[in-house]
Image (tube, rainbow, N blue to C red):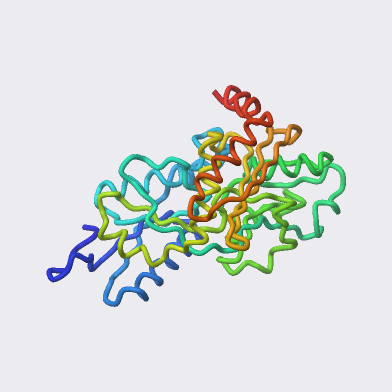
């Protein structure tokens, strides 16, 4: 059973982490295991590897099969069944509204949140010829590329990091776009051709940060995870997620959001676009890092007021 408890303490003597079995997910889970064992002497941490629906269905875009929640559902079920005590997620894969009974106990320090342009022949989008093929699984990235480089062909690319790199190397694409964080964590930084600025490619909400999800009824586990929470990263991600939550676009709409703390102020940049990258709405705001959700809501309302509400309605209606 997960969460066996010492006789002389309320602290669990053993934790089980539910994780996807992709190379990147396992790296993330092992990283958290090492941090926990370093922080808490005598604590044993084990991994429970699982294959999620999102990992199994690779022939359809996520927006058509249920969104990124497909990457976390089985992990949550393992916690409910007592087989695991926590789950480690890439925050960009975590739905904006957690199921009842679950909480994010910690958001860790953030790896590079930027997107990476990866190509064996070209240094940047601007070098690609007309009709050059760009691969990405993200509607957010697709819309931004189409808006800036309408002469390029943008196609869906699914699979884990190594699968995507293999498809590039086989010549199926002229370039692909991946999260820089994943490449760096896997020791594949050398495959990054160009790091895209956040002005060129606004990141996904939560990109680069890890979230530790637990049952709300397990404060003993949350207490062990609390030291892993990074206040700055948490404020940034909470602002981004609050913005996305108001928009209610899920995985069906191109939405980007990126927050930073500058001079003790929180700054959030965001966009919403149609699927073709033709109608594009941008907003930016600053706020108090101690109330990141207020900033997120304000930036979302700005986008909706510009016309994003109509675009989102059209996208959701089309997907229904």
| In the image, farthest residue toward the left | 7
Q: Residue at x 56, y 66 (%)?
A: 186
Whether residue 211 sits left or right of residue 173 in the image: it is: left
- Front one among 8 and 307: 307
The x, y position of residue 305, in whole percent, is 65, 30
The x, y position of residue 301, in whole percent, is 59, 35
Quadrant where the N terminus sits is: bottom left
Q: Is residue 35 above or below residue 315?
A: below
- Front one among 43 and 19: 43
Q: Quadrant of residue 320?
A: top right
Q: Residue at x 46, y 46 (%)?
A: 71
The x, y position of residue 144, in whole percent, is 72, 43
The x, y position of residue 161, in whole percent, is 59, 56
Whether residue 9 sits left or right of residue 90 in the image: it is: left
Whether residue 130 sits left or right of residue 35 in the image: it is: right
Q: How many marks?
A: 0
- Front one among 259 and 65: 259
Q: Is residue 31 above or below residue 206?
A: below
Whether residue 261 sits left or right of residue 118 in the image: it is: left
Q: Residue at x 40, y 56 (%)?
A: 212
Q: Quadrant of residue 226?
A: bottom left
Q: Residue at x 26, y 76 (%)?
A: 42
């Amino acid at each position: 059973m997960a969460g066996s408890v010492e006789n002389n303490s309320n602290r669990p003597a053993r934790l089980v982490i539910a994780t996807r079995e992709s190379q990147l997910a396992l790296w993330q889970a092992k990283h958290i295991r090492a941090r926990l064992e370093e922080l808490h002497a005598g604590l044993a941490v084990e991994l429970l590897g699982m294959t999620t629906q999102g990992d199994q269905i690779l022939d359809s875009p996520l927006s058509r099969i249920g969104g990124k929640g497909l990457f976390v559902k089985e992990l949550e079920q393992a916690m409910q069944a007592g087989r695991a005590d926590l789950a480690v997620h890439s925050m960009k894969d975590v739905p904006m509204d957690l199921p009842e009974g679950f909480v994010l106990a910690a958001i860790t320090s953030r790896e590079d949140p930027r997107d990476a342009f990866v190509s064996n022949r070209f240094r940047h989008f601007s070098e690609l010829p007309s009709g050059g093929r760009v691969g990405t699984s993200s509607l957010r990235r697709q819309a931004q590329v189409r808006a800036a480089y309408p002469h390029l062909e943008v196609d869906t690319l699914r699979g884990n990091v190594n699968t995507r790199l293999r498809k590039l190397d086989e010549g199926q694409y002229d370039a692909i776009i991946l999260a820089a964080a994943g490449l760096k964590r896997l020791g594949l930084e050398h495959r990054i051709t160009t790091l895209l600025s956040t002005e060129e490619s606004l990141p996904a909400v939560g990109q680069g940060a890890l979230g530790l999800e637990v049952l709300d009824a397990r404060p003993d586990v949350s207490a062990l995870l609390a030291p892993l929470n990074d206040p700055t990263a948490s404020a940034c991600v909470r602002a981004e997620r609050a913005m996305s939550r108001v928009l209610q676009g899920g995985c069906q709409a191109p939405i980007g959001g990126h927050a930073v703390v500058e001079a003790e102020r929180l700054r959030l940049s965001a966009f919403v676009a149609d699927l073709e990258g033709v109608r594009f709405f941008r907003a930016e705001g600053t706020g108090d890092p101690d109330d990141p959700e207020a900033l997120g809501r304000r930036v979302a309302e700005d986008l909706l007021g510009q016309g994003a509400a109509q675009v989102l309605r059209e996208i959701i209606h089309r997907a229904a």
